[in-house]
Image: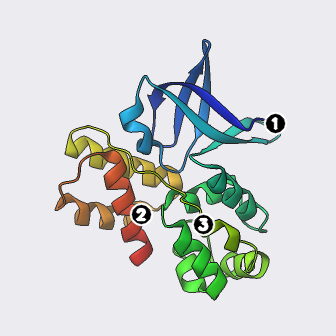
Amino acid sequence: MYEYITGRLTFISPSYVVLDVNGIGYQIALGNPYRYSSKMEQSITIYVQQIIREDAHLLYGFETLAEKELFLRLLSVSGIGPKSGLAIMANDDHQGLIQAIEAGDVTYLTKFPGVGKKTAQQMVLDLKGKLTELVDDPMSLFYEGGNDSSTALAEAMEALQALGYSPKEIKKVEKALEKETLQNTDDYLRAALKLMMKK
């Protein structure tokens, strides 16, 4: 089992990045690939979880071990698969997620794509009291990247689609973000995910 992969970042898409390690390109699915925009062609380390299905061997990536641990705990909940887990992890407010689980806030939890009332209740049932040690861990770092704002907004919207949000939800958020002038795709995606959680 892989713990992490260190390699040169050669490609970023809405749902994954590619790390070149000695001439082999590893495709790693991420909640927010654009957080690495400023690291193109640089050597980076991504913590990974390998998930083997009948038809594929997939790598899911995380910035910290605490993020990886949170993902694995989400996967232990019936009704949450790797794609849903990654979509939940894409929102940087991991402490808000943990607090919602601790407080039994089903309404907050159903704002994530693919999480209905039943799954949200299951999350509370299975995870309440089991995530508190992750609360104090600094789970996210902020990256700066550079790209033109209309391209950045379009890429952020593609990333939302890859996470499983509906075209209708994406359109609403896109309208709100068109009025903003943010630095890069990562900033637009973070802002979009915050808006999704407010709806």
22, above or below 102, in the image: above
The image quadrant that residue 173 belongs to is bottom left
Quarter of the figure with the C terminus: bottom left
Callout 1 crowding tier (Cα within 10 Å): few <14, some 14–19, many ≥20: few
Which sits earlier in the primary sequence, circle 3 or circle 1?
Answer: 1
Quarter of the figure with the N terminus: top right
Q: Which percent across, then down, holds residue 181? A: 17, 55
**Label 3 with label 1: CB-CB less than 8 Å:** no
The image quadrant that residue 155 belongs to is top left
Residue position for label 2: 193
Q: Which percent across, then down, holds residue 32? A: 48, 49
Residue at 67% over, 41% down: 48
Instruction: Name the kind of residue labelled 1 in the image.
Output: Met
Determine the CA span between mark 3 and mark 1.
27 Å
3, above or below 43, in the image: below
Residue at 44% over, 73% down: 197
Determine the CA span between mark 1 and mark 2.
31 Å
Q: Which percent across, then down, holds residue 162? A: 50, 49
Callout 3 crowding tier (Cα within 10 Å): few <14, some 14–19, many ≥20: some
Residue 122 horizontal side relative to residue 120, left or right: right
Residue position for label 1: 1
Q: Identify the secondary structure beneath mark 2.
A: helix
Whether residue 191 is visible, yes or no, is yes
Q: Which percent across, then down, holds residue 11? A: 46, 27
Instruction: Name the kind of residue labelled 2 in the image.
Output: Leu
Residue 185 horizontal side relative to residue 62, left or right: left
Callout 2 crowding tier (Cα within 10 Å): few <14, some 14–19, many ≥20: many
Which sits earlier in the primary sequence, circle 1 or circle 2?
Answer: 1
Nearest-to-viewer mark from 2 and 3: 2
Residue position for label 3: 114
Q: Identify the secondary structure beneath mark 3.
A: loop
Whether residue 199 is visible, yes or no, is no
